[in-house]
Image (cartoon, grey):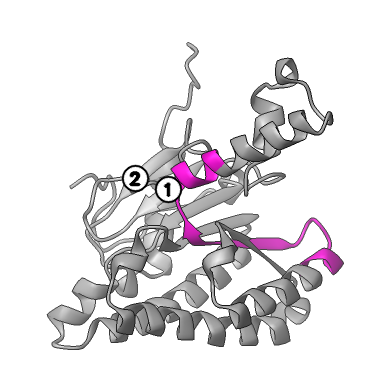
Amino acid sequence: MINELSGKQAGQVDKSRLPRHIAIIMDGNGRWAKKRGLPRTAGHKAGAETFRKIATYCKNLGVEYLTVYAFSTENWKRSETEVGAIMALLRRYLLEAIDSMERDSIRLKFFGDMTAIPPELRSLARETDEITEHLGRDAFQANICLNYGGRDELLRAARRFAADCTAGLRKPEELDEAVFSGYLDSAGVPDPELIIRPSGELRLSNFLLWQCAYSEFYYTDTLWPDFDEAEIDRAVAAYQKRDRRFGGVK
């Protein structure tokens, strides 16, 4: 397994060279529950608590943006019980966030096609959007990918650009990387320097396909509910050892 610092000792983090943006594929909830003879829904509940803990730690560490893969466009294929449990956990989280975002100075943004999300959750998400707009741009921002797929995001962005061209607001020849990025769900958010995938899987799974062009990847066998602050330290320390040339030569 690719994990440069896989021992018990957490890596030494240089706080002067932190990635501005960390993205995490929150994987392994179901396997965590199965190992303990519990229903998959128990794994998602444990995973939600891990997200709260890791988001707080990243904020305190000095990371500016954290993006997590919470529910993909493909996850609707799972059982109605499991999907319902995930949506219920999200509802609880949003209710808590609405009460605490201003106090804790945490911005919240959703990536993904929200039209398929239950109306109550869309309404709660709009409330968090309104609170986010009142917070300063320098506040920590958590991005939650919900009903999200990288290919779907690219298609939706292309359709929006095409619609603007049809409306006379844009010209096809104006399209470049910067313009196209402005049509993505992540518009205004820097690309992630570090993408972490727990659980031992070595796939990107349709996550941030445009934004990951020059991201560093870090994999660990740890299942997401067992992921802790020391795992973040190990991942960041490994990232800080990488030689990032962006296609050039030093």
Q: Looking at the picture, tell me which residue is in the foreground, 226 or 164.
A: 164
**Picture quadrant where residue 7 is located:** bottom left
Q: Can residue 208 be seen at all in this image of the molecule?
A: no
Q: Taking 16 as reference, is 146 left or right?
A: left
Q: Secondary structure at mark 1?
A: loop
Q: Taking 26 as reference, is 129 left or right?
A: right
Residue 173 is one of the magenta-drawn residues: no
Does residue 17 lie above or below 22 as drawn? Answer: above
Q: Taking 91 as reference, is 225 left or right?
A: left
Q: Residue at x 53, y 48 (%)?
A: 14
Residue sitting farthest toward the front: 166
Q: Which mark is residue 207?
A: 1
How packed is label 1: few (under 14 Cα within 10 Å), some, or many (20 or more)?
many
**Picture quadrant where residue 9 is located:** bottom left
> CA–CA distance between discs 2 and 1?
6 Å
Pinpoint residue 160: horizontal percent, then vertical percent: 67, 40
Amino acid beneath label 2: Leu
Q: Residue at x 48, y 21 (%)?
A: 245
How packed is label 2: few (under 14 Cα within 10 Å), some, or many (20 or more)?
some
User: How many numbered discs?
Assistant: 2
* Magenta region: 132-155
Q: Looking at the picture, tell me which residue is in the foreground, 115 or 89.
A: 115
Q: Looking at the picture, tell me which residue is in the foreground, 138 or 174.
A: 174
Does residue 177 lie above or below 11 as drawn? Answer: above
Residue 133 is one of the magenta-drawn residues: yes
* Residues at discs 2 and 1 in contact (Cβ within 8 Å): yes
Mark 2 = which residue?
204
Amino acid beneath label 1: Phe
**Picture quadrant where residue 134 is located:** bottom right
